[in-house]
Image: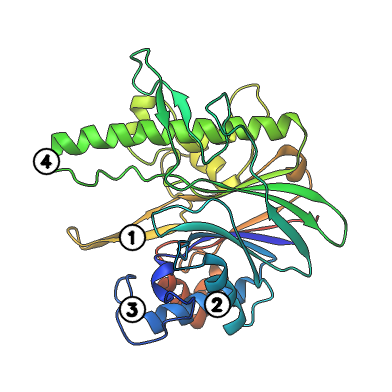
């Protein structure tokens, strides 16, 4: 079985309010491509991935006028994907939903949130989480701008049940800063919020590991070991918190472990951003698929579909071009026997 995570940059802008695709020559929000070109590129990538389930990050918007499910299922029908059934959890107001697109002949899936609605040790992801963010002995309420998607998944052929948690953790970028000092302050505030969100997710991970639930945590963390200087201030990255440290049962992602063990030299990357001011590209490891110990024992295989780092992606002109046109992130897949 193949499970994937894929952040599709501004996927929402490729659909109208009726969930129909906008395959025209208007410029997309994706830099340098038209909506028609980006839509075709995303379709090519999904078709080649041929995944049983894809956690779609930055999925089309869900609101009174727009339907994430309708848009994704329309997209799947147009490109004849076998993963043609969509599932969404708690909607948000960022126009970037978290959704699961899956093959209903192979998998049954449902949104199954865990936790209390009122504030508590591990509240539901659409509630609030109390944590002292700035060590002033006064807890603050933390909320998710994009609540993680909790999925109860069953493999139809074997009856194997597992849990998926789809994640898009808040970015640390200092939006709105007017000077360097303000940028530093906002970055530190955002880092505190991000760390709190990752602690919250880890509490849910602890719940499932204690219950011995097979678990996969996947998505875009906008973070990783050694990614920026603020990690030194807090001592660790949010990814390390979710994975677990010390004597606790740990989740596993080989790319995260590689980054942790090798802070210098070449690193795996799942994203590629253009920096206009510097006229160059920045690469970063932001997207992960973490598995529980029992799933790791099944010998899973991870792959980052990077157009320059993965030889097969690079050799295929069509796939390489599609990956570059589709998004500023690249898919990550997990092949596992379930």
Q: Earlier in the sequence, mark 3 or mark 4?
A: 3
Dot 2 and dot 1 residues touching (CB under 8 Å): no
In the picture, the disc for residue 273 is 1
Q: Residue at x 34, y 70 (%)?
A: 30
Instruction: State the SS at label 3.
Output: loop
Q: Residue at x 56, y 78 (%)?
A: 74
Residue at image mark 4: 179
Marks 4/1: CA–CA distance: 22 Å
Residue on which disc 3 sits: 33
Q: Residues within 10 Å of mark 1 (few under 14, many from 20)?
A: some
- Outermost residue, left side: 179
Identified at 55% across, 77% down, the residue is: 75
Nearest the viewer among 173 and 11 is: 11
Please name which of the two marks, 3 or 1, marks the residue nearer to the observer.
Answer: 3
Q: Which residue is mark 2?
A: 75
Precedes in sequence: disc 3 or disc 1: 3
Q: Vertical placement of 76 versus 293: above or below?
A: below
Question: What crowding class fits label 3: few (fewer than 14 Cα within 10 Å), some (14-19), or many (20 or more)?
Answer: some
Element class at badge 4: loop
**Would you place residue 146 above or below residue 277 in this image?**
above
Q: Earlier in the sequence, mark 4 or mark 2?
A: 2
Residue 99: x and y in percent read 56, 59
Q: Does residue 317 lie above or below 70 as drawn?
A: below
Spatial CA span between label 4 and label 2:
42 Å
Foreground mark, 4 or 2? 2
What residue is shown at x 44% (from left), y 72% (from top)? Answer: 326
The numbered mark, 2 or 1, whose residue comes first in the sequence reads 2
């Amino acid at each position: 079985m193949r499970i994937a995570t894929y952040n599709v940059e501004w996927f929402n802008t490729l659909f109208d309010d009726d969930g129909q695709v906008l395959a025209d020559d208007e410029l997309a929000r994706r830099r340098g491509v038209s909506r028609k070109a980006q839509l075709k590129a995303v379709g090519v990538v999904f078709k080649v991935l041929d995944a049983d389930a894809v956690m779609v990050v930055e999925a089309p918007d869900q609101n009174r006028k727009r339907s994430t499910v309708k848009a994704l299922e329309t997209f799947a029908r147009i490109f004849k994907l076998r993963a043609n059934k969509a599932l969404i959890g708690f909607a948000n107001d960022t126009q970037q939903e978290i959704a699961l697109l899956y093959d209903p002949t192979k998998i049954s899936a449902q949104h199954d949130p865990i936790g209390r609605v009122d504030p508590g040790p591990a509240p539901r992801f659409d509630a609030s989480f109390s944590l002292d963010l700035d060590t002033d002995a006064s807890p603050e309420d933390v909320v998710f701008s994009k609540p993680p998607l909790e999925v109860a998944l069953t493999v139809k052929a074997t009856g194997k049940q597992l849990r998926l948690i789809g994640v898009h953790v808040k970015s640390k970028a200092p939006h709105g800063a007017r000077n360097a000092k303000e940028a530093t302050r906002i970055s530190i505030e955002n880092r505190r919020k991000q760390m709190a969100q990752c602690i919250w997710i880890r509490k849910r991970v602890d719940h499932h590991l204690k219950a011995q639930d097979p678990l996969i945590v996947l998505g875009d963390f906008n973070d990783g070991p050694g990614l920026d200087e603020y990690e030194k201030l807090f001592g660790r990255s949010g990814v390390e918190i979710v994975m677990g440290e010390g004597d606790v049962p740990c989740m596993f992602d080989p790319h995260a472990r590689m980054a942790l063990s090798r802070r210098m030299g070449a690193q795996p990357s799942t994203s590629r951003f253009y920096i206009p001011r510097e006229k160059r590209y920045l690469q970063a490891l932001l997207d992960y698929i973490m598995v529980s110990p029992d799933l790791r024992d099944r010998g899973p295989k991870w792959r980052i579909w990077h157009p320059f780092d993965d030889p097969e992606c690079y050799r295929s002109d069509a796939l390489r071009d599609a990956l570059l046109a589709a998004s500023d992130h690249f898919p990550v897949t997990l092949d596992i026997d379930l």
